[in-house]
Amino acid sequence: MFWLALTLAAPCRAQSPEFIGSGVCLDCHTNIAEGFNRNPHFESMAAGNLPPAQTGCEGCHGPGGAHVAGGGDVTKIIRFGNLAPSAAMDRCLTCHADDLGKMRIRRSSHATAEISCVSCHSIHKSKEVGPLLAKREVDLCYTCHVEVRAQFNLPFKHRVNEGSMKCSDCHNPHGAPEATWASAGSQSMVKHALGNDIACVGCHTDKRGPFVYEHAPVRVEGCAACHNPHGSTNPRLLSRPAAFSMCLECHNGVGSFGTRGDGVPNPTVGFHNIASPQFQNCVTCHSRIHGSNADRLLRR
Amino acid sequence: MTARLLVLAAIAAAAAWPQAVLTPTPDRSTALERRGGYTVSNSFETGYRFATVGGNRDVYDSSVNFGNGVRLFEGELRVDSLDGKSKWLDEFAFNVRGGPGDPYQSNVLKAAKHGLYRYDLQLRSSDYYNQLPALWEGEHGLRTERTWQSHDLTLLPTSRFEILLGYDRNLRTGPGFFSEGIPSSAGALRNTNFLRLAQDVRQENNQYRAGFNLRAGGLALTATQALDNYKDDTTYGETPIPGVLPNIQPTSRLDRSEPYHGNTHITQVALRTEKERWIGFQGAFAYVQGRRNSVLSESVTGTAASGASTLRQTFVFGDAGRTQGSGEFTVMLLPSPKWTLTNTVSASNMRIDGSAELLEVSIFRNQLLQFEHLGVRHIANATEANYRPTDQLGLYGAYRRSERRVRTRSFIPQFNIEQSLLGVDNSVDVGAAGIRWTPLREIRASLDVEIGRADQPLTPVSPRKFHNERARLSWRRDGFSIVGFFKNEINDNRVELADYSSDRRSAGTSLFWSDADGRVTIDGGYSWLSANTSAGIFNLIDPGQAARTIYKSNLHTLQFAAQLRLLERATLYLGYTAAKDAGDGRDDVSISGSLTPTYPNYSFDDANFFVSLPLTYQSPQARLSITISDRLAWNFGWQYYSYEERFSGEQDYRAHLGYSSFRWSF
C-alpha cells in the first residue's frame, strides 16, 4: 500500500493550484486505491510524466481542489453518474479520441442512441481483464439487446454462450467502417476482416475466396442474405428452416433482378424433379454454394 | 517473499443471469494477495462433467456437444506490479475456459511491461458436428475442429510511435462428409444422381502483419501491412453407400485431390485527428489484393447412364484473383455540446477475375476454357446529426445514400456464349430519425424510424421499399432494471410475378431484481418474434402456373434465473431457457397437396409451399454452490436439454448434463 500510495501521490508535484494530485484523493477514497494497480488507467499514473490534468483521478474527474476544500462536496467534482451521456463521452474521448478502434465512435449506433462509455464500462469496479467492462462481455450486451439474447437461445447458434466466441469478434461497439458488402442501411457495427471484407470470413476462411465462380450475393450483399448469424432453427443458421424454399425465393427467373438485370436463373424444368428428395434440397448437388473453382453451377 | 492479503471477500456470488450453459460457475473469489512487488489473484474451477443423451445423438452433437470427462471449467491468474515499474513484467493475465476435452475452449493471455511491450494472445477452439444440409435423412457428418490463434505484440505502447506486430493462425481439420452434383458434361455418369464423398479436411490460414501507430502534429496515423496465406489440402474419397438412399451415383472407386492455395496482401492506413476539437476528421483506406490457385484431379469408376461400367477422369486447374480498394472519409463537427454532426463519404471497388481450364476423359472428351468476372463498386454518403436541446431530450436524424454498380462477364461453355460486360446499378436512399428521452435519470426511452427505397435490388428478397421502427424503454436503478423493446421490419419488393414481401415483428422484455445485500436475485426475459414472408417462386411442376412459398415463424423465447444465498455458505441457482416456434399453427405436416413432402418443415398444395418448423427447445438447470472456506467452494449442477420438432420425431433428443466441481482460489 505504501508503494501504491507513493506512486499515486507522485503527480502532486508541479501542479496547477486547482489540481491536488491523486495522492490527496486516496486519503479518503481508499477503496478505489486497493487493487487500482490492475486498472489499465494505472499505467499512465505509474509513468509519472504526465500532468495531473491528463492522468490519475483528476485526469477523468477534473481538478479536485474545490472538492477537497469543500470537505468532499460532491457538487465540486465531476461525477460520471451525473453527466449526460454525451458529456461523459466527451470526458473519455479527451484521451481516447485517437484510438484506432474508437475513431468512429461519434457516428456509432451506440453514440447516436446516446449510449455513453459508462453504460458499458465500469472504471473502478470492473471484473474483467482489459477493457474495464462492467460485466462479462456477452452478459453486458444482453442487458440491452434482449432480442439478440433470444436468438442465442435457439437450438443452433454461434458458440458465444459457450465462451469460444465473443460479440466483439464480429462487432465493434465503438463503430465500424462503412460496409463494403451492403447498401445504405443500418450496419449493426459489423467489423471488417482482412481490411475490407465481411467479419464472417475472418474465421470462415474457406468461404472467403476468391473463386473462379462466385455466388454473387455473397459478395454483393453479404452472408446475411441467407444466414441468421446469431441463431436459427436451421443447423446451418439459414434464415429459413429449409434451404430449398430459401433458394427458390431468389431463383425464380423473373423481374429485373440478378447481376445482369435479367432475373436470377431458375431451375431447369423437367430435370429438377421436385418429387424427388434429392431435388428438394438444392445443396445436395450445388454443394459449393459459396463459390466454386471448377463448376459454374457450383456443383464441385 | 512475503505474502499479504490485500483484499479478501467471501467467495462472491455473481448476480443471477440466465445462463445458457451452466458451466463455469460464475461465482469467483475476489482474493487479492501481495507477493513481493506484485498483487496476485488466482482461481480455477475443475471437476467432472457427465452427459447422458437419448434420441438423436447427432442433433445433440450439432447443438450442444458436451460430453463426459474431467474438465478445467475455468482458470484465471492475474499478476500485476504494485508500482508499475518492474523490470520486465508489469501485468500478466491468463484466463482459460473449457480445458482439455471440452468442444469449446478459450485461452486468453496478456503480458505487458508498461511503455516497453504489450503481448496479447487468444487461442480458441470449437468442435463442429454439423448437420449435413445435403442429405435428407438428417445425417450428420462434419466433425471438424476449428482452432484460432491470434498473437499481437505492441512495442513501445502508449508512446508517440508504437510498433505493431501480429500473427494469426486459423486451422480447420477433421473428418468430413460431402455430396455434390454431377455436371451434365460428364456423360459417363448419371447427372441426375449425386456423389457422396468422405473428406479429410485440412484448411489452414496464416496471417503475418506489421505496422505502426504514429502520433505527431495533432494527428494519429496507423499503417499496417499484412500477408495472408491460405491452404486447403482437403482430400476426398468414396464413402459407403447405404442402400436406402436413392439417386446416389454408384462408384466402385473414387479418388480426388483438390488443393486450393493463395496469398492475400492487405494494406491499411488510418489517419485521424488526435484530439477532439470543434472540427475533426478521420480517414481510412484499405487495399487488398488476393489470388488463389486451384487444381482438381479426380478419377471415378462407376456406372454410366447406359448401365455400363465406365471411368471418368477429370482435371481442372485455374486461378482467381480479387482486388478491392475501399476508403472512407469523415468530417465531424462539434459546434457545441448540444450538437454532433458527421458526414462520411465511402467508396469501395472490387473486381474478381477467375479462369479455369477443364480436361475430362470419359466417354466424352471436353477441353474448355472458362472465365468469369464480377465487379462491385460502391459509393455511399451518410450525414448524421444528433441534437440535444436539453439533458433529457436528444434528437437524431440521418440521411444515407449509396450507389452500387455490379458488372459481370462470363463465358458459358455449354452454349459457347461469351457474355458482354454488363452492369446493373442500384441506388438506395435511407432516411432515419430518432428520439431519445430521459425524463428521469433511471428511465430512458428511445424511438427510431428508418425508411428506405432501392431502385434495382439484386434479388427478389433484397430490400426495395422498406421501413423499420424500433422502440426501447428501460428503467434501471440499484438492484432493479426492466427493459422492453419493440421492432417492426417491413420489406416490400413487388415486381411482376416475383412479388416478395416480408414482415418481422419482435417484442420483448427483461427484468432484473436483487435485494439490498444480494441474497436473492431474479432475472428473466421473454421475447417474441413473428416472421412472415411471401415470395413468388418458379413452379417446377407447372411452369405456366404461379407458385409461392410462404414462410411463417412465431418464435417465443423465455429465460429465467433465480439465485438464492442460503445461510452463509450455500448458493442455489435455478435457471430455465426455452424457445418455442409455433410455426404457422398447423398441427399436421400435410395441407392438401398431392405431393408428399419429404421434409417435415414444409408442405405443398400443388402451387404453394408452406414452410415452417414448429419446435420446442428447452433447458432447465440448477446448481448448488457450497463455500467450504474463503478459498474453496464446491459446486454441483444439473442441466437438461430437450429438442422436439412437432412434425417429426427423427431429430428429437433429450440430454441430462451434470457436473461437480471445485473452485479453488489461492
Image (cartoon, coloured by chain):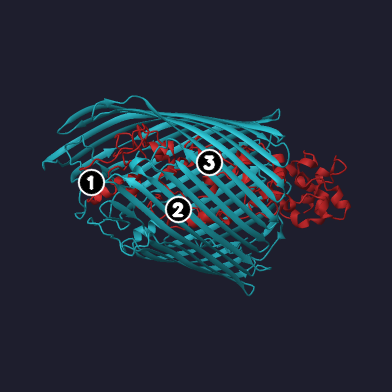
Chain colours: A red, B cyan
Q: What numbered label is drawn on residue A231?
A: 2
Check the picture and name the quadrant holding the C terminus of chain B. bottom right
Q: CA distance from mark 1 to mark 2?
A: 35 Å
List the residue tagged with mark 1.
B542
Q: Mark 1 is on which residue type? A: Asp
Residue A92's quadrant in the figure?
top right
Mark 3 crowd level (few <14, some 14–19, many ≥20, 10 Å Cα): many
The residue marked by circle 3 belongs to what chain? A
Q: Which x, y percent locates residue B514?
A: 64, 66
Contact between labelled residues 1 and 3, with CB atoms less than 8 Å apart: no
The residue marked by circle 2 belongs to what chain? A
Q: Which x, y percent locates residue A240?
A: 38, 51
The residue that appears at 57% across and 63% down in the rendered structure is B663
- Foreground of the two, B482 or B631: B482
Callout 3: SS: loop
- What is the residue that sits farthest to the bottom in this orientation? B567
Q: Give the left or right position of residue B85, taking residue B355 as reference.
A: right
Q: Mark 2 is on which residue type? A: Gly
Q: What numbered label is drawn on residue B227?
A: none
Residue B205's place in the image compared with B80, above or below, is above
- Foreground of the two, A231 or B507: B507
Q: Mark 3 is on which residue type? A: Lys
The residue marked by circle 1 belongs to what chain? B
Residue B406's quadrant in the figure?
top left
Q: Which x, y percent locates residue B164?
A: 59, 34
Mark 2 crowd level (few <14, some 14–19, many ≥20, 10 Å Cα): many
Residue A166's place in the image compared with B167, above or below, is below
Residue B554's quadrant in the figure?
bottom left
List the residue tagged with mark 3.
A191
Q: Which x, y percent locates residue B314?
A: 23, 34
